[in-house]
């Protein structure tokens, strides 16, 4: 059996892995989804529709953040984490098994949207609950490295997604990939469900949450709902956290999720080149998340997040320019690896940095709200917006770089208002 802390990390991270795997696979196979679910000869327009469906899944994320985050602050971290993984699997299964437009007509894109709504709703509550659970299971001096595994699991899911995409496009002819092969990675994602559900259902609640429940029972029998308390007493934390989460959302969705598709459309790389480079780069991302999370325990979240945001502001555009000037496989691997390390330096630290600004009683709600608000507005529709902007007459091939740089400026304005340590709300061992 897994040791207590390790079990907590694996159980909290496995749902996040499934969430990001689903989103990554959708983005990587967006062109195939477009041809199966949307009619018409204009492939660019169909790709925009596929990315629009991708983005619409984010519209419901704030609803999931509110309802599941509130549920997690009331019923417990374990209950919320069990619910989210079930909803994720249902959404993934719907997309994997939905018939194509040629078979059932308009019902096909409607089923696609329904699957994305389920995925988005569950994802809305996933990160807040998982971050709160990990933070409250870690000793104060190890919170950065423990919560960094949440984003490291995203890198692991990207590796799985890229490996699945690389394998399908390598071992199947293009006609088979388009007809049915694109469904295989989605079906593979469902294999995560049994292990994840078992791990989450057998978890114990955190000491911090149990202490908070006891405090409520003793001191606040008529306490406001976590949602109302968050908006009433923690508006400053919401604003600061949102500013930080903007770069979290944009960096991930532009530099990790969108770039493998973007380099095929804009620079003429093949699917095998893009997916292979993504596979290599995400190994560096996983290692980077844990390394930077550990470093934040030593030098502080605020300082490391500032340095990371500055690096993203300065380095992203030159890397895109390098790729345009020398569009070879070696340069692609190097640039995508650099992107992943830059993103890891920020997102490996961000979960602890955001969760620490909220007290235990509203931690799941507060973290879910700022994370999903930023991801909905600035992350989810990024592939669609950037696809349109780079394809339109007069559009810039460097639009993704400008978008990341703008988000970095927003984060740099918010980071100075973060605290480097959690508020004193929990007993030892929280």
Image (cartoon, rainbow, N blue to C red):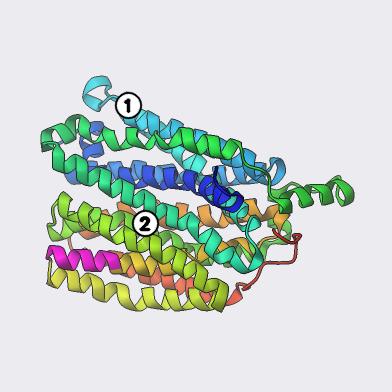
Percent x, y of residue 381 = 37, 52
> Looking at the rendered structure, which numbered label has been put on residue 98?
1
Asked whether, in this view, residue 183 is left or right of residue 123, the answer is: left
Is 177 left or right of 122, judged from the image as shown?
A: left
User: Residue 417 placed where, x, y %?
Assistant: 60, 75
Q: Looking at this view, is 264 or 385 the one in front?
A: 264
Magenta span: 328-337
Q: Residue at x 49, y 43 (%)?
A: 15
| SS label for mark 1 | loop
Vertical order, 71 against 104 (above or below): below
The quadrant of the rendering that contains the C terminus is bottom right
Residue pointed to by mark 2:
253
Image spot of residue 173 (x, y percent): 11, 36
**In the rendered structure, which disc, 2 or 1, sits on the residue that comes first in sequence?**
1
Question: What residue is at 61 percent from the left and 58 percent from the top?
Answer: 135
- From the viewer's perspective, tell me whether residue 346 is left or right of residue 158: right
């Amino acid at each position: 059996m897994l040791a207590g802390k390790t079990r907590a990390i694996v159980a909290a991270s496995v749902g996040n892995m499934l969430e990001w795997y689903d989103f990554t696979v959708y983005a990587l196979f967006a062109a195939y989804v477009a041809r199966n679910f949307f009619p018409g000869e204009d492939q660019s327009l169909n790709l925009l529709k596929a990315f629009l469906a991708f983005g619409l899944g984010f519209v419901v994320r704030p609803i999931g953040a509110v309802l599941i985050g509130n549920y997690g602050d009331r019923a417990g971290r374990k209950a919320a984490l069990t619910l989210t993984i079930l909803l994720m699997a249902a959404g993934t299964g719907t997309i994997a098994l939905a018939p194509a437009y040629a078979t059932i007509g308009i019902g096909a894109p409607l089923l696609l949207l329904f699957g994305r709504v389920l995925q988005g709703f569950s994802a809305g509550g996933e990160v807040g609950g998982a971050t709160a659970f990990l933070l409250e299971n870690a000793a104060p001096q190890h919170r950065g490295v423990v919560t960094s595994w949440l984003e490291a699991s995203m890198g692991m899911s990207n590796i799985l997604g890229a490996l699945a995409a690389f394998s399908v496009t390598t071992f199947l002819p293009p006609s088979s990939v388009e007809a049915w092969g694109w469904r295989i990675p989605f079906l593979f994602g469902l294999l995560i469900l049994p292990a994840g559900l078992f791990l989450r259902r057998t978890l114990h609640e955190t000491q911090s949450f149990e202490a908070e429940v006891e405090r409520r029972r003793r001191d606040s029998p008529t306490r406001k709902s976590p949602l109302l308390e968050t908006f009433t007493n923690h508006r400053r934390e919401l604003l600061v956290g949102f500013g930080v989460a903007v770069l979290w959302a944009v960096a991930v969705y532009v530099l990790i999720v969108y770039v493998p598709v973007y380099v095929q459309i804009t620079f003429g790389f093949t699917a095998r080149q893009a997916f292979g480079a993504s596979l290599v780069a995400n190994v560096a991302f996983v290692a980077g998340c844990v390394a930077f999370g550990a470093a934040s325990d030593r030098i502080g979240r605020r300082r490391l997040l500032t340095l990371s945001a500055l690096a993203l502001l300065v380095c992203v555009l030159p890397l895109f320019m390098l790729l345009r000037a020398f569009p070879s496989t070696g340069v692609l691997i190097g640039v995508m690896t650099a992107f992943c390390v830059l993103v890891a330096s920020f997102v490996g630290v961000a979960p602890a940095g955001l969760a620490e600004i909220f007290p235990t009683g509203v931690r799941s709600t507060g973290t879910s709200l700022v994370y999903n608000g930023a991801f909905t507005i600035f992350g989810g529709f990024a592939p669609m917006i950037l696809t349109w902007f780079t394809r339109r007459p007069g559009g810039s091939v460097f639009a993704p770089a400008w978008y990341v740089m703008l988000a970095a400026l927003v984060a740099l304005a918010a980071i100075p208002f973060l605290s480097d340590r959690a508020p004193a709300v929990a007993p030892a061992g929280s």
